[in-house]
Image (cartoon, rainbow, N blue to C red):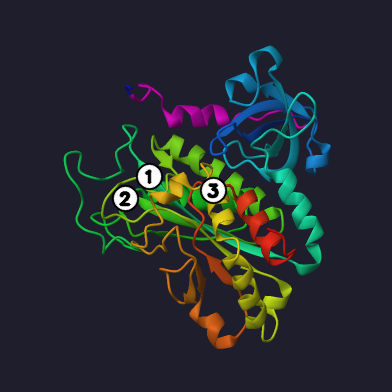
Amino acid sequence: MTHFMLEGTNKTVLDRYMRLPIPDDKCQAMYVWVDGTGENLRSKTRTLHFIPKSPADLPEWNFDGSSTGQAEGSNSDVYLRPIAMYRDPFRLGDNKLVLCETFKHNKKPTETNNRRTCLDVMTRAADTHPWFGMEQEYTLLDTDNHPLGWPKNGFPGPQGPYYCGVGALNVYGRDVVEAHYRACLYSGINISGENAEVMPAQWEFQVGPCEGITMGDDLWMARYLLHRVAEDFGVVVTLDPKPIPGDWNGAGMHTNFSTTGMREANGIVEIEKAIENLSKVHEEHIKAYDPKGGKDNERRLTGQHETSSIHDFSAGVANRGCSIRIPRGVAEEKLGYLEDRRPSSNADPYVVSERLVRTICLNEC
């Protein structure tokens, strides 16, 4: 496939038009949803003749599901139901980004609408106040799918200087990262940090702490913003968990988790109970922790490059080669949280958070 950049586009010229005022009683609402892959996002915009204050104010909409892998052409309308609303960092003003669930013609959730089940689990476990913090790793690519900044006919130097690095020889794509960080803060996403990762051109941002269903909502919209910001820079984002074979780190979505009991005095007892529960359903969680039922994670969870083996469950203090890591500070203070290091970078945050709560809080498989 031939990749090319559209010649002649000029962001300065675009900015002239984006500064044009729009009527006070109108706003642009960008509806965003997860498509039939369970990994990619789609979006489209409508004009509203009022300024919405909450998702409940927003009208239901629809789209051609036969073009997104979510319906047959003979019955292609799929419904968009608004469930979370954010400020639009691209259009500014009163304009909105709207995260939506997808429903089939019979009003049942589409196969990749995992929010429905997640919300049910979060509602049943609400009294445990589950908190999440997800660490989203990703890799930046040129439009030819070659890692950003890498030599076109070779490889950069071995891993070592790139993690949290600085300098033009060690860091590729910081402009994209900084723009994304600021866009998330503006939009209202609870982004808590970012850093360069071990492989050059690989980065991570963190979202949280978020309670319950908000974790999945904020992370999906943060992913949308990442792809959209990178688009402005002519850069591609991949969430592939092992984008470069060989002696290079993969990409995960390490998930930090706690309940009220874990955060209170002597919460280490609850953390140890949670780890015991997780050990009993390792295979089920592995199948849920990437969109391809574990096949993507097979390339990443090898027991090398700061991962555990996909076949074995393990836990340890400050050990990044374990399935579940107990941070050093948590072990010393005997309260806090655990880190599940198994989810792949392209995992659905609704599925990951649901599985953790179902297993730890509800004692269900």
| Secondary element at image label 3 | loop
| Secondary element at image label 2 | loop
| Residue 61: quadrant of the picture | top right
The label shown at residue 140 is 1
| Secondary element at image label 1 | strand
x 72%, y 58%: residue: 212
Q: Could you tell which of marks 2 and 1 lies nearer the N-terminus?
A: 1
The C terminus lies in which quarter of the figure?
bottom right
Residue 176 screen position, x and y as percent: 42, 46
| Residue 352: quadrant of the picture | bottom right
| Residue 106: quadrant of the picture | top right
Q: Nearer the viewer, mark 3 or mark 2?
A: 3
On screen, 307 above or below 299? below
Kindly report the distance in space between the C-alpha atoms of the residues bearing marks 3 and 1: 18 Å
Residue beneath label 3, please? 347
x 75%, y 55%: residue: 121
Let me know if residue 168 is in the magenta part. no
Circle 3: residue type = Ala
Residue 212 falls left or right of residue 90? right
**Observer-nearest of 35 and 26:** 35
Q: Could you tell which of marks 3 and 2 lies nearer the N-terminus?
A: 2
Q: Nearer the viewer, mark 2 or mark 1?
A: 1
Residue beneath label 2, please? 172
Q: Could you tell which of marks 3 and 1 lies nearer the N-terminus?
A: 1
Q: Tell me whether the residue at label 2 lies in contact with that at label 1, contact meaning CB atoms closer than 8 angstroms.
A: yes
**Observer-nearest of 116 and 8:** 116
Question: Start and end of the magenta stretch?
Answer: 3-24
